[in-house]
């Protein structure tokens, strides 16, 4: 089974920056895409940014120009650099990974889509 470990959340003042990290670990898997979603209190979970294994990226309109998603393929890690943070960016940020698990062998490979536990980002003065 693939596990996701997130880090980097915290409290920051408006206009500040944070960098989130999400590392995927497990035995014999490949990733199709990784990304970040967020959920603010009383609101549904929403896409923030995603990146495919080939490097294609997608951003929510609300974060374009402020957030940057990147990855380290060798470490199966995705990052989210968040600049010019606003109070409305306050939410729990969740990592998501989509891929194929081959831990039971190639013929028994199966797709997966996993979520991390989430990391709190609070933007407040």
Image (tube, rainbow, N blue to C red):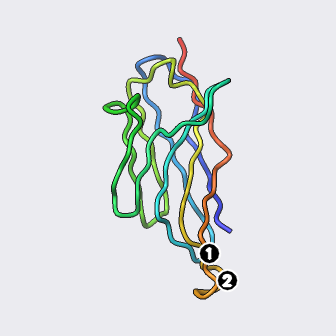
Which secondary structure, mark 1?
Answer: strand
Q: Report, in whole angstroms, how far the alpha carbon at label 2 lies from the one at label 1.
A: 9 Å
Q: Residue at x 36, y 50 (%)?
A: 57
Is the C-beta separation of discs 2 and 1 under 8 Å? yes
Provide the residue designation for mark 2: 104
Residue at 57% from the left image edge and 60% from the top image edge = 24
Disc on the earlier residue, 2 or 1: 2
Q: Which mark is residue 44?
A: none
Mark 2, other Cα within 10 Å: few <14 / some 14–19 / many ≥20: few
Q: Residue furthest front?
A: 44
Residue 92 place in picture, x, y as percent:
62, 33
Q: Could you say which is closer to the camera, residue 16 or residue 56?
A: 56
- Image position, residue 88 (x, y; %): 51, 20
Q: Position of residue 121 (x, y in %)?
A: 57, 29
**Residue closest to the eye, 21 or 86:** 86
Q: Is residue 33 above or below residue 13?
A: below
Foreground label between 2 and 1: 1
Q: Is residue 113 left or right of residue 77?
A: right
Q: Nearer the viewer, residue 16 or 97?
A: 97
Q: Secondary structure at mark 2?
A: loop
Residue under pointer 1: 110
Left or right of 123 in this view: 92: right
- At x 34% / y 63%, what residue is drawn? 54
Mark 1 is surrounded, within 10 Å at the Cα level, by few (under 14), some (14 to 19) or many (20 or more) other residues, namely some
* Quadrant holding the N terminus: bottom right
Residue at the image point whose x is 62% and y is 32% from the top: 44
The percent coordinates of residue 56 (x first, y second) are 33, 55
């Amino acid at each position: 089974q693939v596990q996701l470990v997130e880090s980097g959340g915290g409290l920051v003042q408006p206009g500040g920056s944070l960098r989130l990290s999400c590392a995927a670990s497990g035995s014999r898997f490949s990733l199709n895409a990784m990304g970040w979603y967020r959920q603010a209190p009383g609101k549904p979970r929403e896409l923030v940014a995603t990146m495919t294994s080939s490097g294609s990226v997608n951003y929510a309109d609300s974060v374009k120009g402020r957030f940057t998603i990147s990855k380290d393929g060798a470490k199966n890690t995705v990052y989210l650099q968040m600049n010019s943070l606003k109070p409305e960016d306050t939410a729990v940020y969740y990592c998501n990974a989509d891929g194929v698990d081959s831990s039971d062998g190639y013929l028994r490979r199966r797709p997966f889509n996993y979520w991390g536990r989430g990391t709190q980002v609070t933007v407040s003065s």
